[in-house]
Image: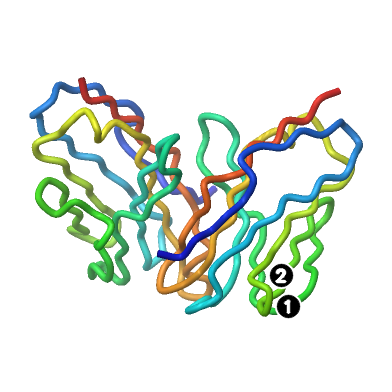
Amino acid sequence: GQNIDQPTEMTATEGAIVQINCTYQTSGFNGLFWYQQHAGEAPTFLSYNVLDGLEEKGRFSSFLSRSKGYSYLLLKELQMKDSASYLCAGLYSTLTFGKGTMLLVSP
Amino acid sequence: DARVTQTPRHKVTEMGQEVTMRCQPILGHNTVFWYRQTMMQGLELLAYFRNRAPLDDSGMPKDRFSAEMPDATLATLKIQPSEPRDSAVYFCASGGDRAAYEQYFGPGTRLTVT
């Protein structure tokens, strides 16, 4: 299978910046997705990177390095509502999801 | 407000019973995915349809699971017979041609098999 690895959980403070890392198998790789999933809800699309570099979308940015098999999701000006699980997913023949990083934002 | 719908939202059943989950993809989307999510395994792809044809169901236990798309507005996932290890949240997601993998997820069916 295509190993998608990301930390199990992270904590941060309201107003801070947090970076969630993801590594993936490069063989057969076509692109990298990030999804947000609040407890008890469905995943929602955040970003898609196919080329190297940083894609910025408001408070959220996603970075990809294809040669290194590495991506990160950067969340700025953290808010309490950002507490959720963040799923990294690699696009191969289909999407393969990591197990998610549970982010807890505290006051 | 286009969204994927799934029924039922919750299902509790006894081991050995048949379970049928339904999904209505977003109108105009031609790709449909079925996922299973558990704490241990995370989100796993079970089956994938494009234009109603099954393209990949390698993640699905074939002896008890089946997935179909009787028409473009309905996808079904059936488990027969169900087992306690099938307890999970089952998500349906749909995507369009332009960004087939920018998937829109339904609210999920939380299945408990006792």
Amino acid type at mark 2: Leu
Q: How is the image coloured?
A: rainbow
Horizontal side, residue A24 vs residue B78: left or right: right
Horizontal side, residue A94 vs residue B46: left or right: right
What residue does disc 1 label?
A52
> Percent x, y for residue A40?
51, 29
> Percent x, y for residue A80?
78, 29
What residue does disc 2 label?
A64
Residues at marks 2 and 1, CA–CA distance in whole angstroms: 5 Å
> Percent x, y for residue B19?
17, 35
Considering depth in this image, is A97 or B74 the residue closer to the camera?
A97
Q: Are marks 2 and 1 on the same chain?
A: yes
Identity of the residue drawn at 84% across and 50% down: A59
Chain letter of disc 1 in the image: A
Query: Crowding near pointer 2: few (<14 within 10 Å), some, many (20+)?
Result: many
Identity of the residue drawn at 57% across and 55% down: A5
Q: State yes or no: discs 2 and 1 in contact (Cβ < 8 Å).
A: yes
Q: Quadrant of residue B40?
A: top left
Amino acid type at mark 1: Asp
> Percent x, y for residue A13?
86, 31
Query: Crowding near pointer 1: few (<14 within 10 Å), some, many (20+)?
Result: some
Chain letter of disc 2 in the image: A
Identity of the residue drawn at 41% across and 59% down: B27
